Amino acid sequence: MPERTSYDAVIVGGGHNGLVAAAYLARAGRSVLVLERLDHTGGAAVSTRAFTGIDARLSRYSYLVSLLPPKIVQDLGLRFAVRKRTVSSYTPAVRDGRPTGLLVGGGEARTRTAFAELTGSEREFTAWQRFYGTTARLAERVFPTLTEPLPTRAELRARIDDDATWDALFERPLGEVVEETFTDDLVRGVVLTDALIGTFATAHDESLRQNRCFLYHVIGGGIGDWDVPIGGMGALTDALADAARRAGAEIVTDCAVTGIATDGRTAEVTCDQGTVGARRVLVNAAPRELARLLGEAPPPPAEGAQLKVNMLLTRLPRLRDTRVDPREAFSGTFHIAEGYRQLEDAYQQAASGGLPASPPSEIYCHSLTDPSILGADLVRQGYQTLTLFGLHAPARLFTADNDATRDRLLAATLAELDTHLAEPLAGCLAHDADGRPCIEARSPLDLDRELGLPGGNIFHRDLAFPYTEAEAPGDTAAARWGVATTRPNVLLCGAGAPRGGGVSGIPGHNAAMAVLEEG
């Protein structure tokens, strides 16, 4: 039960953004209550012992960190760290009937050689360096703005100060610049994948949703790296919950919020355990949930488009491309069926109502970079984790029969992976204490049911460019920070806020800053 009847701030949802907001506000001396419907905090950023009797704590849902600003870690004194991967990616391929692939990482010379061996010249590597040099300069300019008041479109364009880059990434479909810059189909596909993680779109989608997804994937930390959370993703949210509690915030779990009533100055939050008063309410939930709590019309439906799979192996499988050590190939992002044409074909097949014939996916092995998520016995025996993220699997495909469709897609996805392995993956799977293979899969509908992600959308709704279209951001602190809702004292601090999405804490930080600015 909440200890008080009224608080300066009540936060609905104990995911990482809500915990960030709680820690900042409590450190500033505000009375803070966090209400979480599940029996634990963390939302999608949790570590779980997913397999019966197995001492392995997997990052069950979200799994890599890029967008979390070091500022938040430092401000809140978090005992949390990430570790960089030495290999960026490996993409297997077959050229002239011979298994080969592209390994990106291990130093510039090695990567240059890998490009030349795959494509026959240094042209694509030179283009790669130039392209990602441009995105690195973009990241340096854009990432710091994410924890500042929301800029206008004109202000962000001036901050970037590069008309060609602005035009390529903010005005035209991403496919145009990819095709202008690269000629090799596999290289084009590797670039495009960052635009499609959790986003159902083509390279030439006129909505530019693929551009927005790409932008967030290349600006993280000001350098665009995707790092491994030491101890698993739950280590971050455990640290955040500890920081919030140390600062004086109160966290109540197993307490679903059912409604918010407000006159604009004060609010009442109704939950399973009664009603509490609040000066301000911060909603760390999807816009769909915000509308329900306020009794408003729901926003347009959101839709996720991914298959999420967790596995535990007794050992990594051998590759058909014998030039590459599996420990390197799986330590970075292992791309499957993600050539440029393959991605387009998969999109068109899914958009027409069918499962992709060659499901695209990407895989990585957390335990290669951070073995601490495994028990000591498993480490000694050589066990490894695999996390797979399947693309172009929109929720609409699962509505008729979620379980059967998920199982079919999982089988097809693993079969596609097997085409690049020298042995079936099934032979490497560990088994739990009940003798079952250590593999679990989640469809978009599963993620909606378990986490409240609307349609399984990992961003809560389509990502937005990190600016406001208005000529001025508004006359309230909430508007200036991009966290305003239709009610003056109710703020959105979840992934559906502008500049939300990913494991970042940014919407939580920005909502807290808005509250503190208002006094």
Image (cartoon, rainbow, N blue to C red):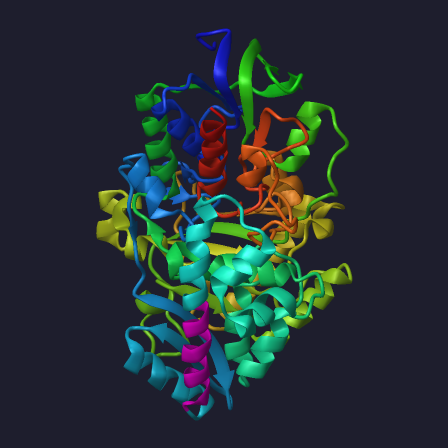
Residue drawn at x 65%, y 31% as measured from the top left:
289
Number of marks drawn:
0
Q: Is residue 131 magenta?
A: yes
The image quarter containing residue 232 is: top left
Asked if residue 49 lies left or right of residue 448, the reply is left
Q: Let me know if residue 18 appears in the view.
A: no
* Magenta region, main secondary structure: helix
- Outermost residue to the bottom: 120
Is residue 467 at least partly visible in the picture?
Answer: yes
Residue appearing at x 61%, y 62% in the figure = 210
Q: Is residue 19 magenta?
A: no
376 horizontally vs 305: left or right: left
Q: Start and end of the magenta stretch?
A: 122-135
Q: What's the residue at 41%, 84% (across, down)?
A: 115
> Where is residue 55 shown, x and y percent of the image?
32, 39
Tell me which corner region of the image, top left, top right, bottom left or bottom right, holds residue 316.
bottom left
- In front: 221, or 322? 221
Residue 294 falls left or right of residue 151: right
Q: Nearer the viewer, residue 132 or 394?
A: 132
Residue 52 position in % (x across, y down): 41, 36
Q: In x, y percent, where is residue 276?
A: 55, 11
Q: Position of residue 343 (x, y in %)?
A: 62, 70
